[in-house]
Amino acid sequence: MSFPQNTGHATPFPRLSILLHWVMAVLIIVMLFVGLVMAHDSTIHYAGLFTLHRTVGFLLLLLVVIRLVNRFANHTPALPMDMPGPMKLAAHFSHILLYGFMIALPLVGWAMLSAGGYPITLWGGCHIPPLMGFHPHLWGVLRCLHSLLAYGLILLILAHIGAALLHGIIRRDGVMGSMLGR
Amino acid sequence: MAHSPRKGSPARWAAVILPPLCLGGLLAWTADIFSPAAISPSHFMQRFHNAGAPGDGFRRAHAKGMCTTGWFDPSPEGRALSRSGIFRGEHLPVMGRFSLAPPLPYLPDNPAVARSLSMQIRSPSGDDWRLALVDAPLQSMRDIADAYAFFGAAKLDPATHRPDPVAVQAYAAQRPWLKTAFAQAKAHKQTSDLTNDTYNSLDSFILTDEAGKKTAVRWAAVAQEPFSPADGSGANDGNYLFKRLVQTLDQRPLRWDIVATVARKGDPVNDSSQPWDNADQKVTVGTVTFTKAYSEDESPCGPMVFDPTILPDGISASDDPLLALRSSVYMRSYATRSAEHKAPSMVTPGDVASPTLTQDEKGQ
């Protein structure tokens, strides 16, 4: 399955996995910026940004489901054998967290809009059904949770980028290359 | 371990650490972490608090209110102006909320206070149109800086429990561009009741028709009940305005025409403190009929947010800076008050069930 030596030529991820990773990476970063602008700027007319945020959020939810299926259906390259145990554990754990946040963030966003009685309109004026009825108390809680999850995801992504670069530049063990298709 | 962790030069370590650090910094900058002096929704929450908003689950402005339900019947003229599904429907459900404008949920009704009407109109296909209207003729602020100063001047003096009149006068005196707005507010003749009042959007909106043609409008909910001047009668009951609204609804439905004032060239679309040309065309896009009243403690309109930028396709916000501000401040108020334990509203379910006015000892 995997190369015994960390020669910088580890098995690459399957093409579909690589495509899903980078498409979602770009979309998630855009979403984080759009979300921060919406939450912190009172001077801009964010109806358009809001529609973008809802549409891309819904798209990301669909993508993460496909990605999850792909993760189990397709093979994932093993980590280099010489990676220390705690580092491997951190890698596995952080990936589970990343998946968890990628699933939870759009779901909480959808639930929060539903609970708050907001119309959930996507590009082209298409409406998606609410996940629940009007529960204003839940709206406040979910709105807060949506922010906390977003801040959590930001930290996870920063750690993920740092770890990838550590593999690619310091350890040079082929882990970063496996997601670059090399 | 077959290999010890490899070492890297400082340049290589920099290449590992700098990219995530830069991205993190950019995200933090987007979240305004480096420029906390900007006016934010939290600053407005503080100003509402200083102006007497108690929290307790009440909205931070237009705090005292009551709910109504009814329907909206659109007109063909509305259909011609906007492609919205709202104007294609018939007999659409409407949830309304009548309120007094100040941030004080236990303010006794009196003729001097500004009143507001918020509505949510929904179509079966999911269109959702929220309106937040007040009975002032023009907005007494033109931008976010004005709004911030306006609510700053509304701060209650701890000794008198009223805003400092000097601060209120200074606000107007320092803003010659609001001269017309204040003059029109002064000339505005208050009606006797909530039932015969006319409520205005102040902010402008853009309608888009089937062909994509855009029209800028200001909304008004114009009462079909005849005008009658406010004379303060009944003011010995702290809820007389709301109780009389319930009494009337117990007898007959109440109707408001939804009138679009269509902008002509030269009308300021992005400044709700300035009047439009008196000769502007007025188009009745439909009629709202209210038939039932509820205390906001037993209706979803109590917690509901009436953010005027929640709009269906075919209606969009103009570039009036106050619309963007209202949206973000309403959202913050909504999040904050939703998490609080709600104290009972002043207009209670009992007041709605038996809206008898309290008489004072003089038997007025």
Image (spheres, rainbow, N blue to C red):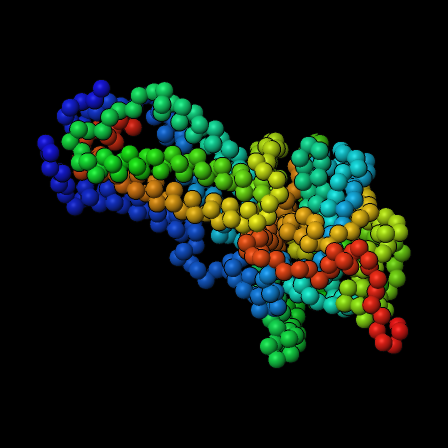
Residue B172, percent from left and from top: 66, 70
Q: Nearer the viewer, residue A12 or B358?
A: B358
Q: Residue at x 51, y 40 (%)?
A: A109
In this rendering, the answer to whether B43 lies above or below A43 is below
Q: Nearer the viewer, residue A38 or A71?
A: A71
Q: How many marks?
A: 0
Q: Residue at point 73% right, 46% down?
A: B95
Which residue is painted at 41% across and 56% down in the image?
B33
Q: Position of residue A77 (x, y in %)?
A: 26, 24
Q: Is residue B110 visible?
A: yes
Q: Is A125 above or below relative to B58?
A: above
The answer to whether B229 appears left or right of B336 in the picture is right
Q: Position of residue B152 (x, y in %)?
A: 58, 68
Q: Is residue B274 in sight in this rendering?
A: no
Quadrant of the rendered image containing residue A125: top right
Q: Nearer the viewer, residue A173 or B245?
A: B245
Quarter of the figure that contains the N terminus of chain A: top left
Figure quadrant of residue B228: bottom right
Quadrant in which the C terminus of chain A is drawn: top left
Q: Quadrant of residue B351?
A: bottom right
